[in-house]
Image: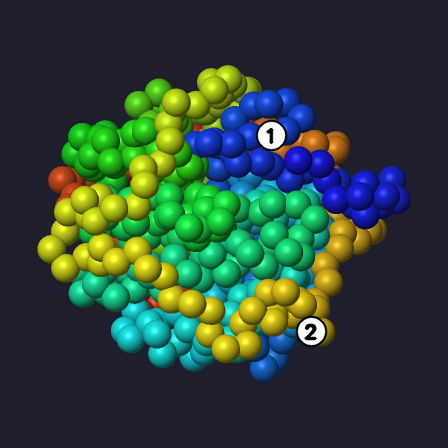
Amino acid sequence: MLMHSALLALSATLAAAVQPLEVKDEHFINPTTGNRFQIVGVAYQPGGSAGYDKEAGIDPLSDPDICLRDAALLQIMGVNTIRVYNVNPDVNHDKCASIFNAAGMYMVLDVNSPLVGDSLTSWNPWESYYAAYLNRTFAVVEAFKNYPNTLAFFSGNEVLNNEDTGATVPPYMRAVTRDVKNYIKNHSSRPIPVGYSAADVREILADTYHYFQCTLKGDDDNMSRGDIFALNSYSWCADSSFEKASYDDLVKIFTGTSAPVFFSEYGCNTPSPRIFTEVGTIYGPKMNTVFSGGVVYEYTQEENNYGLVEMKKDGSATLMKDFLSLTNQYSKLNFTELQGQKPASTSTTKPPACDSKLITSTGFSSNFTLPVLPPGAKEIIDGGVKPAPVGKLVEIKDWKVKFPVKNPDGSTITNLAVKPLADDTINSPGTNTESNTQEGTDTGTGTGTSSSPSPSVSKDAAVRPGAVVLPAVAMGAFAVVAGFAI
């Protein structure tokens, strides 16, 4: 896969740190190196649901000063991917997309929003599947398809959350995936993966995966089959283990996958502050041959207490202990080795044909007859969204963060700025080590307590929006890493 010719023609003054990735069998692949790509991600939805205001023209990628602040912090952490839940296709995202691109970070974007008519519903899904809804999802594709750091789209998030929804939603959810993929095929200069972000409901998880990943007879080019499959899981709490957290069961479910599988959310917040000991396992040999990394929930502190950074209305921010803990865990990873793995030259894994025998849960749909396009939708898929939002990389002249940012101990971080990376460079820990911190006190990171979590632990859905070792100088019980007290 080559970068769009228009992107190649950009002025040399524009930062172009990453290039589009390919999906090959069960892996994300860097087409230049041929290496596998592991997602080291954070869910990015500043302000929660309130951070998306359609009438006010506000979404998480609409304010370049905020994006610059957060990209600088995420760059130091070592993040290479952000997941953004709610975006407004009518808002210009050029500067924010360019900032995250220059910082070496990809974007995974949900095409839905929490507003009525902007998503497929879990109840009576046929009532929410109509042309105006699809037009909105296609507009999100139009707005982001030209950015080289657009990694993938989610056609749905936890729309299936119990056996009852498993009885009616699957054909419609698979149809939305089909429709978005067909739109991309017709209107994008490059393939962009589309898939589903599932809830970790073990009673229906395997069936959900099989339903969305099997090949359907008569489905041209398997357009309804998900290119990727992702999972929101909170079963690893505190200092757990591969077995206690039932990660071993997840590996069993997804071993032999024919599409990239990754955590679209993880990071149990009991106890608090979090210590993120699952990071070493997710990227370790027990899992990294099956999973392609994961996305920690979430960047900003909201009512549900999953945040890494606490934001103020004036744009200032304070790092939480969770931020430091996660940064510390990332710093233990050998990113050169992690991102340097070569996939097998040929994959023997092939998706099964869709068949009712794949479904084992009582009541889960075994109907693989998908709904036909609603009236008016084919015209949009063929002719495109009108007017079509257009995104492009733009020049960023000033990379310095404009807002004050503090450590948990109250010390102020100075010289905070995004470090634009060279072409074809993906962010990793140690990339940006130029920030400094004023003298502060040891904050510690918290140790938490061990627990035996349920394999289906989930956060409150009502408040949600839809080793390269870092330079460190030992200072007693902690160290200053890239300007942060760890």
If you read the primary sequence from the N terminus, does the residue marked by circle 1 or circle 2 appear first? Answer: 1
Q: Residue furthest left?
A: 362
Report how far apart the C-alphas of labels 1 and 2 lie in the structure.
33 Å
**Residue 117: horizontal and vertical position, in percent?**
45, 78
Residue nearest the viewer, comparing 460 with 370: 370
The answer to whether residue 81 is seen in the rendering is: yes
- Type of amino acid at the residue the image marks with label 2: Lys
Q: Position of residue 324 (x, y in %)?
A: 45, 40
Q: Amino acid at mark 1?
A: Asn
Number of marks in picture: 2
Residue 321 occupies which quadrant of the picture?
top left
Q: In the drawing, does residue 2 fall left or right of residue 38?
A: right
Q: Secondary structure at mark 2?
A: loop
Which residue is more in the foreground, 365 or 119? Answer: 365
Residue at 59% x, 59% y is 183
Give the number of the disc on residue 30.
1
Numbered tag placed on residue 386 in the rendering: 2
At a point 66% along the width and 62% down the height, the residue shown is 143
Q: Quadrant of the C terminus?
A: top left
- Rendered residue at 39%/38% (across/down): 261
On the rendered image, what quadrant is the N terminus found in? top right
The answer to which image quadrant residue 12 occupies is top right
Instruction: Count residues near mark 1 (Cα–Cα under 10 Å), then give few for <14, some for 14-19, many for 20+.
Output: many
Q: Residue 65: in sight, yes or no?
A: no
Give how far across and how far down residue 257 sits, in percent.
35, 33
Q: Which x, y percent locates residue 458? A: 25, 54
